[in-house]
Image (tube, rainbow, N blue to C red):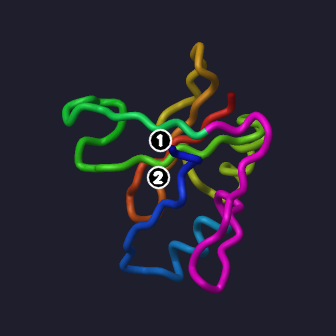
């Protein structure tokens, strides 16, 4: 029944600043309609998972966490350093892949993942 995720939508108090940050930091090309279309590629997976209210994996005051799959985590880290975005947590390698975490200008934790 489900083909895939149709989108992620949220409100912001500073639309222009957030669009600029996601464009510069994550290289997501934001269109005039305040969004973009990310088309899945071979090897790209979207994980849909629930967490209990007290799970410490991401901040409890944050209801949703974005996870973006990246091509090369080390190149991503270099880019983040160049644009002045610090890692919230150092690189973690597990059986599921390699992960890093950053925060957007509104304080949302974002997970970046190389499978």
- Residue 58 spot, x, y in % from top left: 35, 38
The secondary structure making up most of the magenta span is loop
Q: Is mark 2 on a helix, strand or loop?
A: strand
Q: Is mark 1 on a helix, strand or loop?
A: loop
Residue at 71%, 69% in the rendered image: 29
Q: Residue 38 carries which label?
A: none
Disc 1 packing (10 Å; few <14; some 14–19; many ≥20): few
**31 or 84, nearer to the observer:** 31
For the residues labelled 2 and 1, say whether their Cβ atoms are less than 8 Å apart.
yes
- Residue 97 spot, x, y in % from top left: 63, 23
Q: In this view, does 114 lie to the left or right of 59?
A: right
Asked if residue 14 is positioned above or below residue 80 in the image, the reply reads below
Toward which corner of the image does residue 112 lie, by quadrant?
top right
Q: Is residue 7 left or right of residue 78?
A: left
- Which residue extends farthest left? 54
Q: How far apart are marks 2 and 1 (CA)?
A: 7 Å
Label 1 sits on residue: 88
Asked if residue 15 is positioned above or below residue 52 in the image, the reply reads below
Label 2 sits on residue: 103
Residue at 57%, 48% in the rendered image: 4
Magenta range is: 24-45
In magenta stretch: residue 33:
yes
Toward which corner of the image does residue 53 lie, by quadrant?
top left
- Residue 12 spot, x, y in % from top left: 39, 74
Q: In this view, does 101 lie to the left or right of 64?
A: right
- Residue 90 spot, x, y in % from top left: 54, 30
Disc 2 packing (10 Å; few <14; some 14–19; many ≥20): some
Q: Earlier in the sequence, mark 2 or mark 1?
A: 1
């Amino acid at each position: 029944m489900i083909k895939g995720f149709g989108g992620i939508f949220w409100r912001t108090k500073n639309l222009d600043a957030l669009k600029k940050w996601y464009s510069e930091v994550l290289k997501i090309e934001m269109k005039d309609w305040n969004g973009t279309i990310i088309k899945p590629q071979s090897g790209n997976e979207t994980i849909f998972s629930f967490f209990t209210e007290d799970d410490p994996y991401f901040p409890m005051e944050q209801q949703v966490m974005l996870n973006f799959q990246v091509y090369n985590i080390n190149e991503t880290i270099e880019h983040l350093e160049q644009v002045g975005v610090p890692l919230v947590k150092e690189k973690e390698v597990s059986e599921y892949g390699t992960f890093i975490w950053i925060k957007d200008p509104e304080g949302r934790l974002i997970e970046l993942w190389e499978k």
